[in-house]
Amino acid sequence: MISFWEKRSLVDYNYLVIGGGIVGLSTAISIKEKVPKSSVLVVERGILPSGASTKNTGFACFGSLTELLCDIKNMGEDQTLALVEARWLGLQRLKSRLGEKKIDYQNHGGYELLRENEADVIHSVQSVNKILSPLFRSDVFSERKALIRQFGFNRKVIKNLIYNPFEGQIDTGKMMKSLTSLAQQKGVDLLTGARVLAVERGPGAVEVRVENILNMQPIPFRADYVAICTNAFARDLVPGMEISPGRGQILVTSPVQDLPFKGTFHFDQGFFYFRNFGERIIFGGGRNIDFDEETSYEFEVTPPVMDNLKRMLREIIIPGRDFDIVGQWAGIMGFGSERTPILKKISDRIVVGARLGGMGVAIGSRLGDQICELIVSG
């Protein structure tokens, strides 16, 4: 039951954004920047963002060498360049919107660890740099084999390093706190713990029914336009959408004395990734250990993946060093047969922006701008 006062002031909006992660908040901010007098509401199912916006490793990246070689093989050079450009421009948008200090952006560069069976990819560095040159105007990838010893990696396993000077790292907790603060400063309303049950196009508006934990009657919100920004969970509201969940499991260590490296690191075509956070290591990945098991909406950590991450820390990344695991968690990403995000109208008043392919930090801000353009144009 909705009161007279609630109907007048609390449930009727010009724009309603479903999803309070990086894409949802970016979309809401962009709408307020473009239409300052509009009323905008963001609803988020969790108390904290539910997908991966605050559950990632904090990479400001756009793809490792082996990832891009795979994309070139499957998509071609032009589409791969366009994908990298979207990620790169998204990172610049994020930094310009919030400022590097507020997201703790640090540019220590990125590296890819190559094992024996991947050593030949070094011969592809020049060709990939040529493909990316229209965007970066300088070489992106170069060989840094001599750093293997300095960084302390297991030289029996790691045979080469590829360096990328354009890659950085951020604090995604600070990023989301800053996005939330900016949205509220601009007049965006935000409801958390608000699970959307249904989105229905009605006469002249869209009705969004939100679960009411106090009784069995959902609360009906009304909006002129709705943006669905729930990434892997978009399929709950738009059945049949070509998107699948992908669970990313992550751990963090205690401080490692005299940790010998700084930066972001990838290996195994980007399926494993780690970085320093001060003297700690944040390490995640491993979906490729069992794709079927990790195609999941469950926020769980599992022994097969976690045991592999711990083993790789001991045997490859920091062999011979003492450390403890002080935290572990999982986030849910959205993937599909195509590497590009979904951005489309599903009606004249409803827009979907989802399927970020594990690149939400890079793509999210720019995708928010694009969703805004699509929804504000009507």
Image (tube, rainbow, N blue to C red):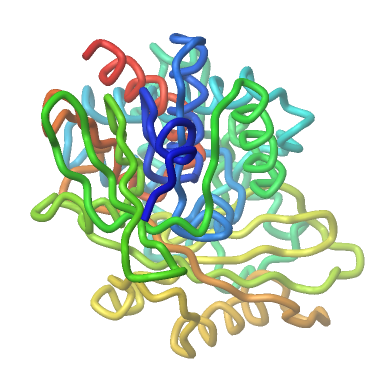
Q: Is residue 138 visible?
A: yes
Q: Is residue 265 above or below residue 322?
A: above
Q: Please name the residue shown 68% across and 49% down the image.
A: 173
Measured from the top left, where is residue 372 in percent x and y? 36, 20
- Residue 196 point in image, percent of width and height: 33, 54
The quadrant in which residue 296 appears is: bottom left
Q: Is residue 337 above or below residue 361?
A: below
Please state if 101 lies on the left or on the right of 227 as rendered: right
Residue under the image location 55 percent in, 77 percent down: 309
Q: Residue at x 41, y 16 (%)?
A: 133
Above or below, 297 relative to 360:
below
43 or 282: which is nearer to us?
43
Horizontal and vertical percent for residue 3?
43, 46
Q: Quadrant of the N terminus?
A: bottom left
Position above or below: 162 against 330: above
362 or 130: which is nearer to us?
362
Q: Is residue 300 left or right of residue 256?
A: left
